[in-house]
Image (cartoon, rainbow, N blue to C red):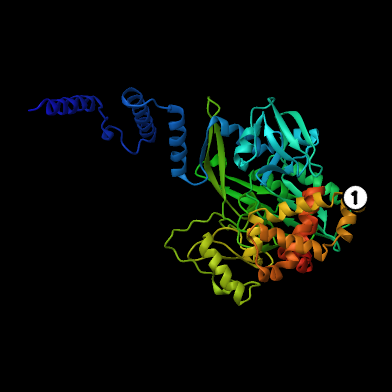
Amino acid sequence: MTMKNNFVFYFHYKLLIILSLIVIPNTECFPQENRDELINFQSAKLRYILEMAEKYHFDSLDIVAACDKAFSSLLKEFDPQSEYYSKEMSSYIRERYKGVLVGIGVDLIVISDTATIANVAEGSPAEALGLRIGDRISAIDLISTVGMNREDVLTLLQGDEGTKIEIEIRKFPTRKIEKHSISRLKYDSPSVGANFVIAGTRVAYILLNRVSEKTPTEFAEALNELNKSDYDYFLLDLRNNPGGYLGQSAQIADEFLEKGQIICRTQSKTPEFDSVFAASGNGTLKDMPLVIMMDSNSASGAEVIAGAMQDNDRALVVGMPSYGKASAQKFFNIADSSSFRITVAHYETPLGRAIQKNLSSDEKVELDPSARMHMDDENFSKINEMIQKHGGKTHMPIFKTPKGRTVIGGGGIIPDYFVNYDTTTTLTKVLRAKAIMMTWSMYFIEKNYEMFENEYKTFELFDKTFNFTNDDIVHFANFCVANKIWNAEMFKIDRHYILFHLKALIAYVKWGSNEYNKVMVRTDPFVKKSIEIMNESKALIK
């Protein structure tokens, strides 16, 4: 045997010795039915793996990072909504659910290689400093942000509460350079995105972005603002609302229901999480005709609100089938400030419809022809496609409301009236995705700074009298061509929408999100359909 072979044999011999020392206990000594001993054994396995890895692995190990990933994967094995959060993420998640964030209070888009402020949170350090939409952040702590992507710039802006950063700003639209020191502080992240009476109607509109701890208070404040105006109908926009707290969602539903009407029920294997939410009768909108708008991104608490209204014959639902997420999670804190949440219950609508979608990849889903409701042949076909895509059950149950209306179970909330979410052409979709329309809107304001200062000092004046000239439209087209995104035929099809969107974006930059939505609702097919059926909704409460 050569020296080389001796070495190989010696190496394998030592490895066998090590392996022989790694004695795995016999799993048969812990019967499967004994859950406590089973958990103890699995915990011991994890500890044993970590100890052996720390002792024998050839490289240095980041045990904390490895365990963070392992815990995250473990919880995802339970269900998609059970999650583990590292110490850093835990703080963010807790504040987010409370409706509070830490930072300077801006969101960004990148325009011409420079991070540009696209939103300034009300009550944030950025607002206090006088930062506004369109201002460009050219440096943070002497680090140039030119050429950085959005995520990298946001990372530089993040940090612990109370810490300070130095920022260099190029003001919009004057391009004046300013340098400031700004502190990262807590600020509210409101869940009410807009509230106003739609122009030319008597329809009050509230956009609810999510359901946080503060949502009932914010909703009440929005109502107080609306009550300064006259309105006879109510439109609640829950599109793209991922939900949030179940209790707070029930409080929003409570505003519209009579005393004792069921909002939702939760079911769990643990009795402490079984509950029934019923209306208090103290709501201020019990007699207000109501329409709710939803889409495939409406989930959780948003689905609870819509389901309660539908099952109690309280409102009509317009839009698309909702996401179908109906599970309640409980948070658990760990000593090192990390945390996790696990699904403890599922909830259902007052009629017993399961909101949670469960669909295997080989399961075929079809809508019962008896459940056509208000669908024509085209929409009936489309809804079958959407149900197949987004989930459901092979045999979708049909329910009858107290007034004899048909509602569909099987996962998610199926609307009473269907509206296609986006019928615009590929040109418009790409222009939005690439922020071309937002960029041009900022250029337009910058170019016409004196006009806006002198002729359009208020949103109301701008909204009533401003229209784009032919030269403006040609300039926009040339701008798109310069950015290699253009199709004349598609522009002809979407011209009306694009011009409305550009006007809305100018309103957003100048006056904020409320004014943006005031313009956009006038070209929104969901809103158009909702207004059309308001009198039908009114008939439900008689």
From this view, report whether residue 505 is shown above or below residue 127: below
Asked whether, in this view, residue 47 is left or right of residue 384, the answer is: left
Residue type, numbered disc 1: Lys
Taking depth in this image into account, of 312 and 507 the one nearest to the observer is: 507
In front of the other: 387 or 488: 488
Image position, residue 279 (x, y; %): 71, 50
Position of 378 with respect to 358 (left or right) is right
Please rate how many residues cluster around mark 1, counting C-alpha atoms within 10 Å: few if below 14, some from 14 to 19, many from 20: few
Q: Where does label 1 land, which residue?
A: 457
- At 58% from the left and 48% from the top, the residue drawn is 266
Position of the C terminus by quadrant: bottom right
Q: Position of residue 428 (x, y in %)?
A: 66, 62
- Residue drawn 9% across and 27% down? 2
**Where 79 sits versus 473, above or below?**
above
Say what secondary structure mark 1 lies in: loop
Question: Is the N terminus in the top left, top right, bottom left or bottom right quadrant?
Answer: top left
- Residue 384 lies in quadrant: bottom right
- Determine whether 512 is above or below 353 in the image: above
Occupied quadrant, residue 8: top left
Q: Residue furthest top?
A: 55
Asked if residue 55 can be seen in this view, the reply is yes
What is the x, y in percent for residue 212?
68, 42
Residue 541 appears anywhere in the view: no
Residue drawn where x is 81% and y is 63% of the image:
471
Instruction: Count numbered badges in the picture.
Output: 1
